[in-house]
Image: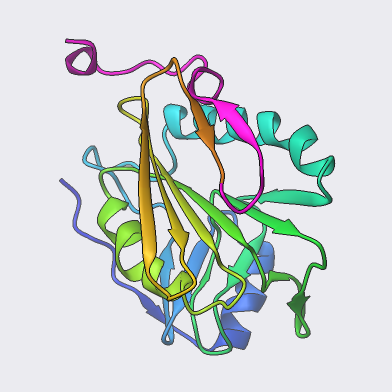
Amino acid sequence: MSAAPKPQKMTVAEYLARERDALEKSEYLDGEVWPLHPPNERGMAGASRSHNEINENLTAELLPLLRARGCRSYSRDLMVRTGPAGLYTYPDLAIVCGEKLFAEDDPDVLLNPQVIVEVLSQSTQRYDREAKFRQYQRMPSFREYVLIAQDRPWVERQVRQPDGTWAVTTFEGLDIDLVLATVPVRVSMAAIYADVTFPETTLR
């Protein structure tokens, strides 16, 4: 098993300048730069095939539905910033309805996503659920967090309530629809997981 990578130290300006030409994306928090996809259990970096299939399936299904409602999605190539001194990262999918706000110092940094989707992996799921979720909550626009499993047809949806708490709903199985709360759209779980091969243990 490979050792966890150590973060690099740099300023926000240095980080943004490096990211423009970087072959491998990284994220930034509190002066430290981390690889977006750390090495997995086999010591290999990068998203898995299932991760990419799920992300592309969901993007394709949502595109016409969001356009019809004055919304649009951005995939992993567009950065999101949670605050002036907060996290800079690349969600698997970010959805914006209405006006889109971008950072004054970088027009490729989105500031106001309403919905964020992350495809979970073993190496990052705790981070996605805890530290990253707390960072996302710093954005006033952020209303809904969708976490998608790779190894089984399972999705968790968290929706911000008027009192600031988060209501959790899970969707499991290929014969139902994932329903978003912030944007009135629904996508079949079978479409999200099209062509994805699950481990044999999932099918038992």
Task: Give the quarter of the figure containing the N terminus.
Answer: top left
Was residue 196 drawn as part of the magenta stretch in this picture? Answer: yes
Q: For this rendering, which residue is in front, 199 or 34?
A: 199
Q: How is the image coloured?
A: rainbow
Residue 153 placement (x, y as % from top left): 37, 25
Q: Residue at x 38, y 63 (%)?
A: 166
Query: Is residue 169 depicted above or below 20 in this figure?
Result: above
Image check: 157 left or right of 15? left
Foreground pick, 27 / 66: 66
Q: Which residue does the image show at 69% across and 51% down from the upper left?
A: 74
- Report the magenta residues as a range: 181-204
Query: What residue appears at the point 42 percent right and 17 percent down from the top-left corner?
Result: 174
Pick the residue in front: 164 or 92.
164
Residue 61: give x, y in percent of width and height.
Answer: 67, 29
Foreground pick, 136 / 9:
136
Residue 174 can be seen in this image: yes
Q: Position of residue 59 (x, y in %)?
A: 65, 36
- Residue 36 visible to the viewer: no
Residue 88 in the image: state x and y as whole percent.
54, 73
Q: How many marks?
A: 0
Identify the residue at image location x=66%, y=77%.
17
The image quarter in which residue 172 lies: top left
Q: Is residue 103 left or right of residue 49?
A: right
Asked if 14 appears above or below 124 in the picture, the reply is below
**Residue 185 is a magenta residue:** yes
